[in-house]
Structures are given as C-alpha cells and as structure tokens.
C-alpha cells in the first residue's frame, strides 16, 4: 500500500504505516491463492460486490486480485479488485490520513475480540503466511 498524510514532515513513515483506522485494510496484506477474503467497501452493489461479501482468491497480479464470490446468488462470479484510496473520516488523528490499498480483509480477522467456550478450525491447506500465525501463552 501507499500511505500519506496532509503534513508528512511531522510524522515518520514507519509510524504512518503502522496505523490501521477503523474500516481500513492493514498497510501490508500477505495474500495467497485459495485464501478467503471479504470486501471492506461496496464496489458494485447491484451486481453483489458489497461490503462483507466473501471471496476466494484465484489469482494475484501486480495491480489486481482476481477473486471468485464464495457463496450466495452470485457464487462463482469473478471480481477483479484493484487498490483504492481509503481516507480517514474520523477525528481519530490530528491529520487527514490516506491509504491506497486493496479494500479487503481476511475472514479470520472478523472473529478477533470475540469470546467462545469452544472453537474448531479445519485447515486443509496452509492458511497463514510465514510470520502471521501467533500463539498466546
């Protein structure tokens, strides 16, 4: 991604890259084919390309992600997702923050912060990229 603020000289780029405001994708997305993702923005609501729609990555290219709708009436239809500008609307920072990134997030991240008594995960293929899995304890 590329991140900018309205007064870049006051903030180190390392600090800016670590910011992830609500509704923004992370600065770095480690993607792999066959991984499940979800849209963070409505791209074309009339054709089913909406916020929270689930997709499977079928191809990774320099400037687009080739995906297939995972479920629902538009299942198996193809969507090419390009990077878009995300602009902070909240008063979260003392500056305007812009990130140009793919408007997606990984489905496993949707469950963060929830509490379950029991959970099971079936991963028939490697899900995490190197350095993405974490252990607490």
Image: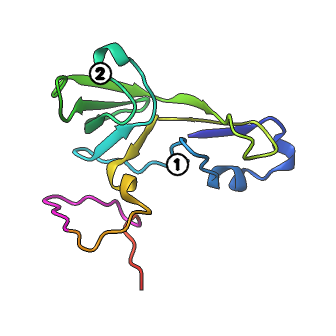
Instruction: Name the secondary structure under disc 2.
Output: loop
Of 15 and 24, the residue lying toward us: 24
Q: Is residue 46 left or right of residue 104?
A: left
Residue at the extreme top of the image, as rendered: 46
- Position of 41 compared to 9: left or right? left
| Residue 75 lies in the magenta stretch | no
Q: Which residue is mark 1?
A: 26
User: How many labels sit on residues?
Assistant: 2
Identify the residue at the far bottom of this view: 137
Q: Vertically, is 21 above or below 69?
A: below
User: Residue drawn 22% across and 45% down?
Assistant: 34
Spatial distance from mark 1 to mark 2, Cα to Cα?
24 Å
Query: Between residues 119 and 11, which one lies in front from this camera angle?
Result: 119
Give the colouring mode of the picture.
Answer: rainbow
Among numbered discs 1 and 2, the one appearing first in the sequence: 1
- Which portion, as a residue range, is magenta? 120-131
Q: Quadrant of the N terminus?
A: top right
* Whole-percent x, y for residue 113 in the image: 44, 63
Residue count near mark 1 (Cα–Cα under 10 Å), binned few <14, some 14–19, many ≥20: some
Residue 110 vertical placement versus 96 (above, below)? below
- Residue 131 lies, in percent from the top left, at 41, 67
Q: Main secondary structure of the magenta part?
A: loop
Is residue 122 inside the magenta stretch? Answer: yes
The image shows residue 30, relative to residue 44, as above or below, that is below
Does 93 sit left or right of 27 as displayed? Answer: right
Provide the residue designation for mark 2. 48
User: Are circles 1 and 2 on residues that touch, CB within 8 Å?
Assistant: no
Q: Quadrant of residue 85?
A: top right
Toward which corner of the image does residue 105 lie, by quadrant? top left
Residue in the image at 27% along x and 32% along y: 67
Outermost residue to the left:
124
């Amino acid at each position: 991604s590329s991140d900018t603020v309205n007064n870049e000289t006051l903030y180190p780029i390392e600090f800016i890259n670590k910011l992830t405001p609500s509704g923004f994708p992370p600065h770095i997305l480690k993607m792999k084919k066959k991984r499940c993702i979800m849209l963070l923005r409505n791209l074309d609501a009339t054709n089913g390309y909406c916020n929270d729609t689930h997709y499977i990555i079928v191809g990774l290219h320099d400037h687009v992600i080739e995906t297939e709708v995972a479920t629902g009436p538009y299942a198996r239809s193809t969507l090419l997702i390009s990077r878009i500008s995300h602009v902070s609307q909240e008063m979260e920072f003392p500056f305007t923050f812009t990130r140009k990134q793919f408007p997606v997030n990984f489905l496993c991240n949707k469950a963060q912060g929830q509490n379950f008594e029991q959970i099971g995960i079936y991963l028939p293929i490697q899900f995490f990229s190197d350095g993405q899995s974490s252990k607490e304890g």
